[in-house]
Image: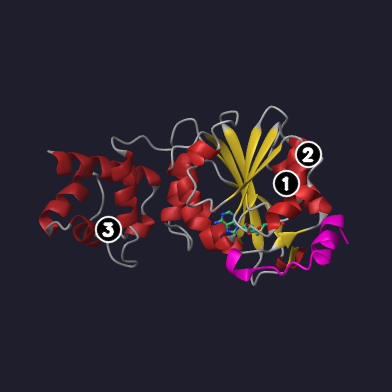
């Protein structure tokens, strides 16, 4: 058993399911995740949910500095005691979704990497926040549920293809790094997990006139599954059929196509037409 696990046991800490506390103690796996995350001594790292610090310890050895944000107050003294030899670590207690992350990370070298075995109950809002919140991030290296990894990596028309795939693939070049079976965690979650690495692109995968409109149109594509893009445009933009049909035609798209079949390029063309139509 790892030393960290021993210490958790000694402290009589009960894992809080409500906080997504599924900890990793396998040193080989933790080393593999750190290597896959590509952390180097030139770079600072933001870790979300350090727990009792088992991944944090590896990150501190690999990175220049590590800033770890942990919500559970009970873990802060444990973390500090476990990691007091790590001089390049700063621990902040708080909810990552509520903190002013720009302020919290202001002393980190930019851009910084985000590496974490995240609490699964905030997966999608957290990824959105990290990718669209204006933070200077070089890449995300995150443990997520296998189903979420499938969505992040899906291609148009595939089962998981949806708003999360589009967000991640427009702004990043995601790859599956490690599949992690549920039994590697303590306590094991109900489903298997995957560690995914999402380096941010220098420029988005598709150029659009208005990025906010692109994401509105992309979300519209999935507003009502199995409906046509035309119907979804009418509903999302509260516009009449003839106008939305004009947008589809101007974008070179078949009126009958379903939203979930559209590629990034097709969505970008459509978003540009809608941007023009809405602002004219
Ligand atoms: N990094 C540790 C590991 O790999 O063993 C723990 C990972 S555990 C999946 C998720 C951690 O995130 C827990 O320590 C939990 O307390 C913390 N957490 C949960 N919600 C959080 C939030 N909103 N902000 C910051 N940390 C949170």
- Asked if ligand 1 lies within 8 A of label 1, the reply is yes
- The residue wearing badge 2 is 86
**Nearer to the camera, 63 or 102:** 102
Question: Badge 1 local density, few (<14 within 10 Å), some, or many (20+)?
Answer: many
Say whether residue 265 is visible: yes
Looking at the image, residue 77 lies above or below residue 224: above
- The residue wearing badge 1 is 56
Tell me the element at label 1: helix
- Residue 164 placement (x, y as % from top left): 45, 54
Verify whether residue 10 appears in magenta. yes
- The residue wearing badge 3 is 229
Image side of residue 133 versus residue 222, left or right: right
Work out how far the residue at label 2 is from the one at label 3, CA to CA, in angstroms. Answer: 53 Å
Looking at the image, residue 66 lies above or below residue 29: above
Tell me the element at label 2: loop
Say whether residue 32 is visible: no
Residue under the point 76% across and 36% down: 62
Looking at the image, residue 238 lies above or below residue 107: below
Do the residues under discs 2 and 1 have CB atoms within 8 angstroms? yes
Magenta segment, which residues? 1-19
- Residue 133 placement (x, y as % from top left): 44, 42
Question: Badge 2 local density, few (<14 within 10 Å), some, or many (20+)?
Answer: some
Q: Which label's residue is closer to the chain start, 1 or 3?
A: 1
Residue under the point 53% across and 57% down: 123
Residue under the point 31% across and 62% down: 223
Tell me the element at label 3: helix
- Residue 113 placement (x, y as % from top left): 61, 38
């Amino acid at each position: 058993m790892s030393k960290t696990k021993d210490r958790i046991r000694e402290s009589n800490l009960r894992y809080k399911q409500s906080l997504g506390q599924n900890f990793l103690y396998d040193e080989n796996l933790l080393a593999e995740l750190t290597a896959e995350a590509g952390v180097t001594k030139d770079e600072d790292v933001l870790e979300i949910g350090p727990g009792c610090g088992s991944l944090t310890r590896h990150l501190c050895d690999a990175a220049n500095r590590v800033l770890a944000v942990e919500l559970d107050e009970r873990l802060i003294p444990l973390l500090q005691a476990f990691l007091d030899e790590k001089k390049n670590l700063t621990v902040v207690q708080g909810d990552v979704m509520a903190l002013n992350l720009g302020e919290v990370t202001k002393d980190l070298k930019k851009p910084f990497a985000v590496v974490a075995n995240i609490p699964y109950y905030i997966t999608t809002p957290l990824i959105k926040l990290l990718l669209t919140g204006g933070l200077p991030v070089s890449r995300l290296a995150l443990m997520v549920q296998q189903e979420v990894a499938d969505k992040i990596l899906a291609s148009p028309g595939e089962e998981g293809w949806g708003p999360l795939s589009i967000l991640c693939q427009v702004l990043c070049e995601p790859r599956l790094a490690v599949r992690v079976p549920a039994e590697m965690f303590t306590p094991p979650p109900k489903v298997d997990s995957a560690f995914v690495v999402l380096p941010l692109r220098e420029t988005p995968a598709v150029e659009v006139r208005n990025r906010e409109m692109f994401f509105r149109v992309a979300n519209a594509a999935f507003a009502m599954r199995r409906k046509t893009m035309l119907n979804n445009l009418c509903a999302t933009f509260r516009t009449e059929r003839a106008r939305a049909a004009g947008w589809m035609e101007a974008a070179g798209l078949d009126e009958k196509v379903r939203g979930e079949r559209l590629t990034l390029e097709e969505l970008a063309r459509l978003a540009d037409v809608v941007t023009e139509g809405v602002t004219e």
